[in-house]
Amino acid sequence: MIYFDWTATTKPTDAVVDKVNTVLTEEWGNPSSVHGFGGNAAKLLETARREVLRGLGFGREAPGRLIFTSGGTESNNLAILGAAYAKEKRGRILITEGEHASVEMCAAALEKDGFEVIRIPTKGGVLDIDAIRQTKDVYVASFMLVNNETGAVYDVAAAAKAVRENSPNAFIHTDAVQAFMKLRFTPERLGVNAVTVSAHKIGGLKGTGALYVDKDSLTKKKLSPRMLGGGQEDSLRSGTENVPGIAAFGAAVREAMETFTDRAEAVAKLREHLEERLGGTPLIMNLPRMALPNILSVTVPGIKSETVLNHMNERGFCISAGSACSSHGHGMSMALTGFGLSPEAADSTVRISLSHLNTESEISGLADALSDALSLGGLKSHK
């Protein structure tokens, strides 16, 4: 099987596996314990915290706090629910169309609890900044930085600026899970209060993530905890920390930073090769105005995405029909319809995601297999 579903998860790197083995066999103490084993584990946490903060563009000192969590979903829940319920009154929540399920479901739950939720259009993979600018009295806003289904890069900095024109005290969050270590950014340049990142999207382990929260939000208590207990992670996320996963997260970030340029150039070349191979076929590439090169959304006209996935699986290629986290549901993809696809086209669309670990020969095989899928609907591939 040849893997083209790197947006769903990545293979742990050798450095990550080595770090996990070391922690499990040598540094397995509880970081809250006051003895030597606990102290060693606590040092591992702080080393990893510095590494992830470096990945977010901070030097030795960060003005805010990095809170380790169980992953992107928990970080998004902490940011959105934590900020919403830190207020005494119900207010207005702002998100984009086609957010990850962990953001959309939080918004839906808040909607049922009396909050007003406004979903900003993202047609063509572009945030409707005018719609944001016209929205007043915003309590919480959450805009993903890179869409996990189309690869669209949203102008979060412009969105945050537009929010603050009418709601200067709004808590603004970005889900940067798909952008982290693939796009250079900092929370300060984006103008946001909080940023979600995840380990298993960059060669780390599943079950590990983090939420960066700025100093202003911490000082003014704009965030309330969702997990109560022993007071770990500055009492914003109680529970014994996942030291092996967190230490591995730090190792993954360090390795990704050291190889950032090489990885980016390799993926860009693979993307160019893939577009060349698919160009001239009836396959439709859904190309945002600004996008990361590692994600490509492709519509196979007239053929259900499930049929395409089965065909590709039989040919030995792993792709997806959208977010792995939304595959348990049966609803229409809001990311694709928000992009501008009809419900029929969205239901015939697959997602290909690339890694620097892929090769041009694998890309060629993928393009041939995907073109052959057209015959399932009676169309010719025109290869």
Image: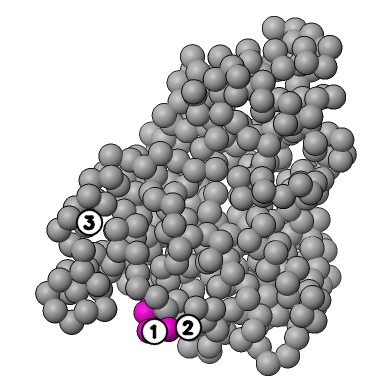
Q: Which dot marks residue 314? A: none
Tell whether 142 sits left or right of 78. Answer: right
Residue picked out by circle 3: 24
Residue 264 position in % (x across, y down): 46, 36
Q: Nearer the viewer, residue 14 or 151?
A: 14
- Find residue 228 and name its label: 2
| Mark 3 residue element | helix
Q: x and y percent of residue 5 in the render?
A: 55, 35
Q: Secondary structure at mark 2?
A: loop
Q: Quadrant of the C terminus?
A: top right
Alpha carbon separation for disc pair 2 and 1: 7 Å
Residue shown at 73% from the left, 26% from the top? 307
Q: Amino acid at mark 2?
A: Leu
Task: Measure the alpha-carbon separation of dots 1 and 3.
Answer: 24 Å
C-alpha gap between disc 2 and disc 3 = 26 Å
The coloring applied to the image is: one colour
Mark 1 lies on residue: 231
- 217 sits left or right of 146 in the view: left
Q: Residue at x 45, y 41 (%)?
A: 10
**Observer-nearest residue: 100 or 263?**
100
Asked where in the image residue 280 lies, by quadrant, the reply is: top right
233 falls in the magenta region: yes
Residue range in magenta is 229-234
Residue 287, magenta (yes or no):
no
